[in-house]
Image: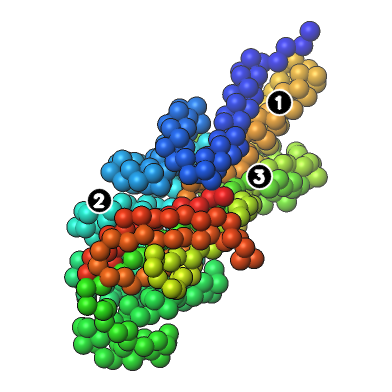
Amino acid sequence: MMKTPRSIIDLFITACLLAGCVSPRALLVDLNRLQAKCQYDEAAGLVEKSKMSHYGKKNAFLYYLDQGMLLHYAGKYSQSNEAFENAKRLSQELFTKSVTTEASTFLVSDNMRPYYGEDFERALIHVFSALNYTFLNKNDDALVEARQVDFLLKWLQTDHGHRNVYTEDAFARLLAGMIYENQGETNDAYISYWKALEAYDVYKRHYKLKAPSLLVQYALKTANRLGFQDQVIDIQKQWGGKIPRRLPKNAGEVIVLHYCGLPPHKVDSFFEIGFGAGWSYARAVKPKGKEQEEVEKASAIARSILAEEVVRMAFPKYEKTPYKIKRMTVQAEGARKAHSSRLVENIGSIAEKNLEDRIGRIRAKTIARAVIKFALSQKIASKVEKKKGKGAAWLTKKLLQAVSSATELADKRFWQTVPDRIFMTRLVLPAGTHTLHLTFKDSKGAVVSNRDLEDITVKSGKKTFVTVRTAE
C-alpha cells in the first residue's frame, strides 16, 4: 500500500485545525445575544472562558479589546481600563515586531500572525479609556488619553506613511474637546474642536457624515471666549452657526452617548486565479532571508507549471450584522421636549472603508504567497514521484494544495464587541439629580423599547457624560 509522508499528513491536520480556530461564528453569535440582553458581565465571563480556546496567544490583543469593551458596558471602568492598557501595550509591541519581520515572514498567512489591530481600533481604545476615566472622576487621566489619541493620529498622518483614508477620528477630537473644556483648558478645547470640524469634512466625503451642529457651537463658543474673532468668522464661513448663549445660571449639560448596534463582521470571499496570471504578483515580491530561498525555488519550477492551473485563495470582506434599534430620543423627567440623537461616529463605515483602502495590497500579497506555495507543492510532488511513484506524488500534491487552501483563509479578525455607530444627545438641565427617559426606535421610527436612566447628577457649568448600549 502506498504511504504518504507522515510530515505531510501532520501538516495537513495542523493546518485544518488552525484554520478552524479562526473567528468561530459560535462565539460571535453568543456575544451578540448577550449584548442584546444587556448581560455584559456574562459576556465578559464568556470572553474570559474563551481566552485560550478562542483567542490564544496570537489573538490576545482582541481578547483585551473585547474584555475592555464589555466591562465598559457593564460599568466596571477600572477593570475595563486595565484591559485597554494591556491592549495598548501589546499592540505597540506586536506592531514594532511586525515592522522588523514583515519581509522575512512573507510566506506566513496573515491570519496565522499575531493580530495588533486596525488603525481605527487603536484610536478607539483611547476614546473608551478616556470615558472610563471620566466616569471614575479621574479627569487628569482622561486628559492623558486625549493627548495620546492626538499623538496616535499625528503619527498616522506623518511617520506611519499609510495610504488609508483613516488618519483622523472626528469623534475622538470632539470628545477630547469636551473633556478639555470640562477641565477649563479652553485653548486645548478650541484646538480639538477645530480639528474635529476638519475631520468631519473628511467624514462627509468618505462616510457621508457631516459635523454636528453642536460641535460648531462649541468651536464658536471657545474661539469667542479666547478672543479669536478671526477664527469665529472663519468657522461661520465654513460651517455656519451662531455663537451660543451662555448656560443658564446653575445649569449644566448632559451628554448622552448611544452605543448603537453590532459592527459588520468579516467573512471569506473566495477567489480563483490562473497560475500564469498569479505568478506576475509573485515576481514583484522581494522577501529576505530563508523566504528568499523559498521564492527562488518556486521560481525555478514555475515555468514547468501550466498557466491554466487554478490557484484558490480567500480575501476578507465585510457583511452587515442586522440589528433593530437605529435611533434614540431622550427626555428629562418633567420636561416637555424630547431630544433626538445625532450620529457622531460611524465605526462600521470606517471599518469597511479601511478594508477597502487596503484590499489592493492584501490581494497582491495573498496572490503572490498562494502561487509561490503552489509552485513549491509541485516541487515536493516531483521529488515524491521520483522516490515513490506517480500515485504518491498525486496524493502529496493534493494534500499540499489542501494545506495551502486551509491556511490561506482570509484574515477575518476584528473587534467584535465595539458598537456599529455612536449617537450623541445633549440636554441642558438645572444642577441636581435627574431621571432621563430613553426611547429607542427602528429605521421607520417605530418604538422598539424604552429605558430610564436614574440619578443622573448634573453640575453647574459642567458636562456630565452618560452612555447607553443597545444591540438588539
Residue at the far top in the pictured view: 1
N-term mark: 2 or 3: 2
Query: x, y (%) of residue 46?
Result: 47, 32
Q: Residue at x 36, y 59 (%)?
A: 435
Dot 3 alpha-carbon crowd within 10 angstroms: few under 14, some 14 to 19, many 20 or more:
some
Q: Is residue 150 visible?
A: no
Disc 2 vs disc 1: which is toward the camera? Answer: 2
Q: What mark, if any, has residue 399 been given in the picture?
A: 1
Which is more toward the observer, 104 or 148?
Answer: 148
Front label number (3 vs 1): 3
Q: CA distance from mark 2 to mark 1?
A: 56 Å
Q: Earlier in the sequence, mark 3 or mark 1?
A: 3
Note whether 120 is above or below 272 in the view shown. below
| SS for callout 2 | loop
Foreground mark, 2 or 3?
Answer: 2
Pointers 2 and 3 in contact (C-beta within 8 Å)? no
The residue located at (61%, 19%) in the rendering is 10
The amino acid sitting under disc 3 is Asp
Q: Which residue is mark 2?
A: 136
The answer to which quarter of the image holds residue 143 is: bottom left
Residue 101 circle label = none
Nearer to the camera, 294 or 161? 161
| Residue 127 position within the rendered picture, expressed as x and y whole percent measured from the top left | 35, 57
Whether residue 267 is visible to the viewer of this picture, yes or no, is yes
Residue 88 appears left or right of 161: left
Kind of residue at disc 2: Leu
- Structural distance between the alpha carbons of marks 2 and 3: 41 Å
Return the residue at label 3. Answer: 268
Choose the circle earlier in sequence order: 2 or 1: 2
